[in-house]
Image (cartoon, rainbow, N blue to C red):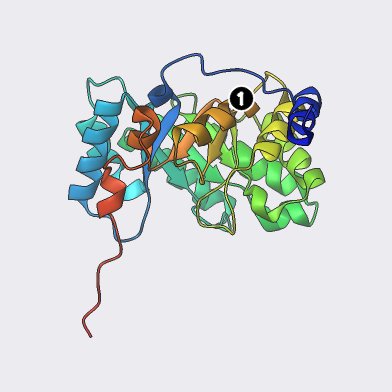
Amino acid sequence: MEKNGIIEQVREEVFPSGKAAEKPLGKYCDHTVLRAYTTRETVKQFCEEAVRCGAASVCVNPVHVAYVHELLRGTGLYTCTVIGFPLGANRSCVKAMEAALAVEDGADEVDMVMNIGALREKDYELVRRDIAGVVAAAAGRAKVKVIIETCYLTDREIVAASLLCQQAGADYVKTSTGFGTDGARERDVRLIRQTVGDTMKIKASTNINTREDAERMIAAGADRLGTSRTPQIVTGDAKAHSASMENQPPKQDC
């Protein structure tokens, strides 16, 4: 057997590929548009695209939640938003209020950013309370996903963060904001899955641009994918047109 074949065989033994996609790939995707310069027209384009692709949700900044809730009414897609984004450095009471207002506006899912500095300082009680406050604010009306920003954490810190998410009553552990130094990695998704087992779901986010990327993350244990490239994932065509291609920073006057 060639060297590469041996490596892949051993890799499969050590890191089994796990589950294959159990539903259409679109249903794994939170079609995401979170840039500061995003307009309502761009948000509308993302919503229309998400419906065509059969996505799970559209994920937007809180200011767009009510608008997206109306656009998606009757489509079966969820309205998703972000809390304490992208740094996670807001006071816990601010995150809880932001989550409560988002739910009032129609959010079905809220993706909050963990207090990353507190986790690294091992102030675990603060981290737990921070998450629990958002869970309480969601009041069972919205699913809570906790972004732990794996690119800044050691393996031990990823395990600790995942356990705190579990203890605080969150629904998902999410890897990344998309504003950090890196995004989802298969090894991190596997580590989270090994930590929480089947008691929680996992959202892998960022660096998921193709069907192959999506399938790898699902095989590693992801239940949901944060991506702006849902059309490319669904069609399998890396060059497929998507609204994200047009949602670029405006050019400044010289």
In the picture, measured across the screen, residue 207 lies left or right of residue 151, that is left
Q: With respect to residue 39, does 186 lie above or below?
A: above
Q: Quadrant of the C terminus?
A: bottom left
- Residue type at the position of mark 1: Ala
Name the residue located 24 percent from the left edge and 27 percent from the top edge: 52
72 or 241: nearer the eye?
241
Can you identify the residue that label 1 sits on?
Answer: 219
Q: Residue 126 versus residue 116: which sits nearer the camera?
A: 116
- Please give the name of the residue rendered at 35% of the width and 60% of the height, measured from the top-left corner: 36
Task: Pick out the residue farthest to the bottom.
Answer: 254
Q: Is residue 231 left or right of residue 152?
A: left
Q: Where residue 153 appears, x then y in whole percent?
A: 72, 51
**Residue drawn at the location 21% of the way across and 34% of the way down:** 48
Residue 18 horizontal/vertical position (percent): 66, 20
Q: Quadrant of the N terminus?
A: top right
Q: Residue furthest front?
A: 1
Which residue is outermost to the left? Answer: 41
In-image side of 104 versus 86 (left or right): left
The total number of labels drawn is 1
- Depth check: give the residue in front, 159 or 184: 184
